[in-house]
Amino acid sequence: EPEVTQTPSHQVTQMGQEVILRCVPISNHLYFYWYRQILGQKVEFLVSFYNNEISEKSEIFDDQFSVERPDGSNFTLKIRSTKLEDSAMYFCASSRDRGDGYTFGSGTRLTVV
Amino acid sequence: GEDVEQSLFLSVREGDSSVINCTYTDSSSTYLYWYKQEPGAGLQLLTYIFSNMDMKQDQRLTVLLNKKDKHLSLRIADTQTGDSAIYFCAESMDAGNMLTFGGGTRLMVKP
């Protein structure tokens, strides 16, 4: 069964550093998403991406965050200057059509020290 | 804003039925989803229901929707130890829109 692949599975970074979280969505999917889950809290929406542009973003997704689809396969989330409170599990997801229900990746655990 | 609530924990014996409940506040929720998360894994879509439906059955899974009370439930028949996981309820107002998740219900299945 096709999967959404996320790398790395765990990343530790120093506060103030830039990080890039990588995702390979399912190849024929058209809609891409990032969510995050801070330990002990709910899964929260960050951003959705379609047709090479952001279609929706939450209040969390401020100027520190950016997304990119640099080629036909990767979908990346960049955090420019990480803060301690950015420590969370970050999930990438994709869907073929609106309403299909997303396929999520296994997540990247980001730890900011 | 939208809110989705679930109980934190459910424990059942193997072979029994499990019922996981969820309530939501947004009456314009159109799509309601159930996801399963096993340790170290991502969120696996189990099933979803449109708001114009009352019930959906898929093998051992039955989803019931009470739109008037904004209550969603997931029933797992003949629960197995492999069903032990965290189950998340989620809603969205439109297909492809952001999902609002509940906090997850940890299901423990005792042999």
Image: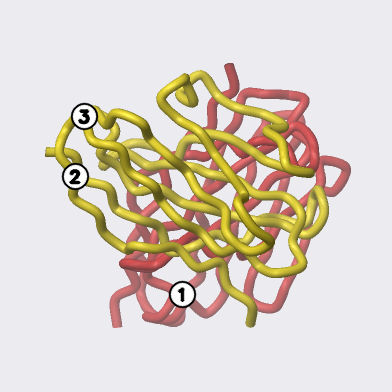
Tell me what hue chain B is rendered in: red
Q: Secondary structure at mark 3?
A: loop
- Tell whether A6 sits left or right of B33: left
Q: Residue furthest left?
A: A113
Q: Which residue is mark 2?
A: A13
Q: Is residue A15 above or below residue A9?
A: above
Instruction: Report the Cα–Cα distance between label 3 and label 1.
Output: 51 Å
> What numbered label is drawn on residue B16?
1
Q: Is residue A61 above or below residue B86?
A: above
Instruction: Report the Cα–Cα distance between label 2 and label 3.
Output: 9 Å
Chain under label 3? A
Q: Residue at x 53, y 44 (%)?
A: A34
Instruction: Report the Cα–Cα distance between label 2 and label 1.
Output: 45 Å
Q: Residue at x 60, y 51 (%)?
A: A70
Q: Position of residue A32 (x, y in %)?
A: 65, 49
Chain under label 2? A
Q: Quadrant of the C terminus of chain B?
A: bottom left
Are both tags, 2 and 3, on one chain? yes
Q: Is residue B23 above or below residue B32?
A: above
Chain depicted in yellow? A
Are both tags, 2 and 1, on one chain? no
- Tell whether B83 sits left or right of B61: left
Q: Which residue is mark 3?
A: A16
Within 10 Å of disc 1 (Cα), the crowding (few <14, some 14-19, many 20+) is some
Check disc 3 and give the amino acid type: Gly
